[in-house]
Image: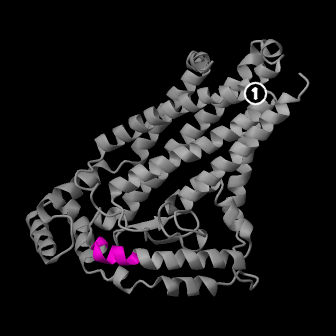
């Protein structure tokens, strides 16, 4: 049954066209978010200076700047030398308890405080962060150069903005693939035959395996294709071992900007792999939501697709323009699949007052999968009793 459903999906020309469109979209955005020239230049400098801030790094950088006669690079050298003067004792003076107290004293425009429930969860979050800061202090995280003055910009473009494009493409494919799987029988006029018995109606759960397998394969292929091209154009040699919590990095989301304080010493390579894993969980949550609509036969295929798209857009607008941090709803919205994509820049960082718990992205994606799974099971139960 599963093999048969997979074959039907693989032979669907519309899904094949959608996959090619997703590849084309990723290719376009590679050109938009690529920093090939700047990264190549920075790598040539790092080969002479090293990638850890120290006296020898500063001396080597000064010699390199003096020896380079290219006037176009003068401003870049100046920014790098200015960056060397920045205070590197950030993690030594970082006090999570003080950050919590500052957040607890925040007031909204109408004078109200943050939700008491949210503050209780944040208290635990910052108590846990206090233990993590010690590891960041001992590992010399702040001294990692990463991409120096361009770290925040390059990190945000390559891992946050471009990563969001790839994730949206895979989620879009997963939703349409799942809806197609559940509506093939109706489109082929075989629904009455297949679901005329109780055993036939139980196939709604079995059919779910096919879109999961196909969407998982597409997620892997699209990720390999998109990031493979991206890293062919942008040289990350020696960068993978740098700490993502370097003092040069920052957490950037549409609502906030601040230092990227991670839950321990996480390298760029580990951050990249972990982000792909969470992205896969987010895709699965959207797939299960589509399966709930498709399996219950609530609406025709185009209507179901439009309903899910409208749901995502409306939720995105609410997440974007819901400013009431005094309400627990503010935080619940950011723990939905749409909220996770919107706040991708906060993944694996402490997140300030925008997140309630440590590893918010991992916990939120697992909760989305759980609740959408419950919705799917209820839809299957509804379909068993439905009069076709």
Give x and y (percent) for residue 77: 21, 68
Give x and y (percent) for residue 34: 37, 47
Give the camera-side residue of 44 and 203: 203
Q: Quadrant of the N terminus?
A: top right
Q: Is residue 136 magenta?
A: yes
Give the camera-side residue of 157 and 196: 196
Q: Is residue 42 magenta?
A: no
The residues colored magenta run 133-141
Give the residue drawn at x 67%, y 24%: 181
Give x and y (percent) for residue 122: 59, 76
Q: Relative to 332, say whether 101 is above or below.
A: below
Question: Does residue 298 appear anywhere in the picture?
Answer: no
Q: Give the quadrant of residue 300.
A: top right
Give the residue drawn at x 63%, y 44%: 285
Q: Main secondary structure of the magenta part?
A: helix
Q: Which residue is mark 1?
A: 301
Give x and y (percent) for residue 229: 35, 38
| Rendering colour mode | one colour
10 Å crowding of disc 1: few (<14), some (14-19), many (20+): many
Q: Relative to 92, say whether 163 is above or below.
A: above
């Amino acid at each position: 049954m599963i093999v048969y459903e997979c074959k039907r999906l693989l032979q669907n020309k519309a899904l094949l066209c959608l996959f090619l469109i997703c590849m084309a979209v990723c290719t376009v955005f590679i050109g938009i978010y690529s920093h090939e020239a700047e990264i190549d230049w920075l790598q040539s400098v790092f080969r002479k200076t090293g990638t850890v801030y120290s006296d020898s790094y500063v001396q080597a950088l000064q010699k390199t700047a003096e020896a380079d006669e290219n006037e176009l690079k003068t401003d870049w050298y100046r920014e790098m030398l200015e960056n060397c003067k920045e205070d590197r004792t950030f993690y030594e003076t970082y006090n999570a308890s003080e950050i919590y107290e500052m957040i607890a004293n925040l007031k909204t425009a109408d004078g109200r405080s943050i939700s008491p429930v949210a503050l209780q969860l944040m208290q635990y979050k910052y108590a846990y962060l206090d233990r993590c800061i010690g590891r960041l202090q001992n590992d010399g995280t702040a001294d990692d150069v990463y991409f120096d003055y361009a770290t925040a910009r390059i990190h945000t473009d390559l891992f946050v903005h471009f990563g969001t494009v790839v994730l949206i493409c895979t989620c879009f494919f997963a939703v349409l693939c799942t809806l197609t799987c559940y509506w093939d029988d109706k489109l082929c006029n075989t629904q009455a035959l297949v679901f005329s018995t109780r055993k036939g109606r139980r196939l709604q759960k079995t059919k779910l395996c096919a879109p999961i397998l196909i969407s998982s394969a597409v997620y892997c292929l699209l990720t390999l294709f998109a990031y493979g091209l991206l890293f062919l154009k942008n040289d990350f040699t020696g960068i993978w071992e740098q700490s993502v919590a370097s003092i040069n990095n920052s957490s950037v989301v549409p609502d906030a900007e601040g230092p990227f304080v991670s839950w321990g010493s996480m390298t760029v390579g580990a951050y990249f792999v972990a982000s792909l894993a969470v992205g896969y969980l987010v895709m699965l949550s959207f797939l299960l939501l589509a399966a709930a609509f498709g399996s219950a036969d609530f609406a025709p295929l185009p209507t179901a697709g439009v309903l899910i798209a409208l749901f995502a857009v409306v939720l995105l607008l609410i997440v974007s323009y819901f400013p009431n941090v005094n309400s627990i709803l503010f935080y619940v919205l950011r723990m939905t699949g749409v909220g996770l994509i919107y706040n991708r820049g906060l993944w694996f960082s402490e997140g300030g007052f925008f997140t309630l718990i440590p590893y918010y992205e991992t916990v939120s994606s697992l909760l989305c999968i759980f609740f959408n799974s419950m919705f799917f099971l209820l839809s299957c139960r509804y379909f068993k009793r439905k009069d076709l």
